[in-house]
Image: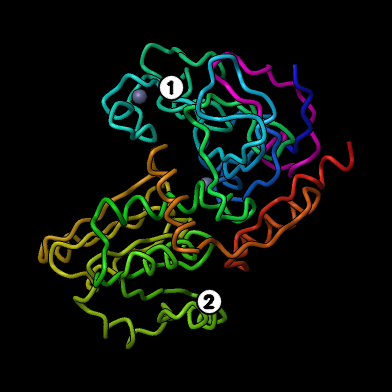
Amino acid sequence: MIHTVGYAAKQSIAGLHRHEFDRDEAKANEVEIEVLYCGVCHSDIHQVKNEWHNTVYPCTPGHEVVGRVTKTGAAVTRHKVGDVVGVGCMIDSCRGCEACRAGEENYCEGPNSFLATYNGPAVPGKMAIGGKNTYGRDNTFGGYSTSMVVAEDFVLKIPSGLKPEVAAPILCAGVTTYSPMKRWGVQRGSKVGIVGFGGLGDMAVKLAKALGAEVVIFTTTKEKLQEAARLNVTGVLESDEGSIHSYKGSFDFMLSTVPKKHDLNPFLPLLKRNAPMVVVGALEPLEPVNNMVVAAHRLSVCGSMIGGIRETQEVLDFCASHKIGPDIQMIGMEEINDAYRRVENDEVRFRYVIDMASLKSKQ
Ligand SMILES: [Zn+2]
Ligand SMILES: [Zn+2]
């Protein structure tokens, strides 16, 4: 057993507190990882507060994990002790369904879908057809902890050109925004509109620019316009109807990164004929869209969720070769409840990254 110290929520209203538990040692195909850094994703907050009504407590979040391999199982070939590696939103999948065979484990169609890095299978046993949990685990503990044990196929290599702490948020925020841009063909000369300028929006802007697109970001927060200027992209306030109208029919691709229910209708007229509005931020019912506008220009309103393991490695390598990464602010584990409050109040554009040394020093 590997004694592990983490932070967990015991119930939806309690915040996160120190939580000690044991992890099983690595099986033949698994690696043990000493966690160095873990990004703070808005999903962590949704999950801790049971806002998706599927939280298993105690809940130790964290799916933007970077660490160092400390031990490898006998059959491991892809990683070795000392490697700096990453773990994103998944630690296993059924491996047999059409999506898994296509390398899109994030859309696993097995009875329990993928095994999430925390909070267990994406489809828990009690919600699965046949009532089974093929992973044998109801709960999994994420990266707000000192160690992880993960099947090697779900462990990413962190390129040497990326600082480990900067790489962490790429494992969720990076691939979540990169995957739909690749899927819908964002390329040199594309005109891309991004709605929402938090952690996802920051990555989306940088990735779209690196792909060669012209980028406009829409935000409700006046202070974030300066940040847009600093990144050398146009920022538009959502309340500025005149500016919004001036983009009518101009975008090849739009991405909504707003992490909660919001109205897409003001943005749909800004899309070119045949163009998609892809929603990655909010995983809940949205305001109804006006299909007169959608149909009149053969638009698409789509969703996309994280990315497969192969694509996650691709975006890590892409960020390293283009020298881009999220803006981060490092915090100690004990600052997490404060950080959540600030993220929820929409105060931060950067990504918080927890320095796990803060946890180890108090062991
Ligand atoms: Zn996430
Ligand atoms: Zn599958």
Q: Earlier in the sequence, mark 1 or mark 2?
A: 1
- On the image, the x and y values in percent for residue 325 come to 53, 61
Q: Is residue 330 magenta?
A: no
- On the image, the x and y values in percent for residue 125 come to 47, 18
Q: Check if mark 1's residue and mark 2's residue have beta carbons within 8 Å.
A: no
User: Closer to the camera: disc 1 or disc 2?
Assistant: 2
Image quadrant in which you'd find residue 250 = bottom left
Amino acid under disc 1: Met
Q: Residues within 10 Å of mark 1 (few under 14, many from 20)?
A: some
Q: Residue at x 63, y 62 (%)?
A: 328
In the picture as drawn, the residue positioned furthest to the right comes out as: 362
Amino acid under disc 2: Thr
Specify whether 76 is left or right of 334. Answer: left
Region in magenta: 9-32
Judging depth in this view, the residue of 294 and 166 nearest the camera is 166
Q: Residue at x 49, y 65 (%)?
A: 202
Q: Residues within 10 Å of mark 2 (few under 14, many from 20)?
A: some
Image quadrant in which you'd find residue 309 = top left
Q: Which residue is mark 1?
A: 127
Q: Residue at x 17, y 66 (%)?
A: 293
Q: Secondary structure at mark 1?
A: helix
> What is the tally of numbered marks visible in this picture?
2
Q: Is residue 29 magenta?
A: yes
- On the image, the x and y values in percent for residue 302 come to 27, 51
Specify whether 64 is left or right of 123. Answer: right
Q: Secondary structure at mark 2?
A: loop
- On the image, the x and y values in percent for residue 251 come to 24, 71
Is the CB atom of the residue marked by disc 2 within 8 angstroms of ligand 1's nearest atom?
A: no
Tag on residue 221?
A: 2
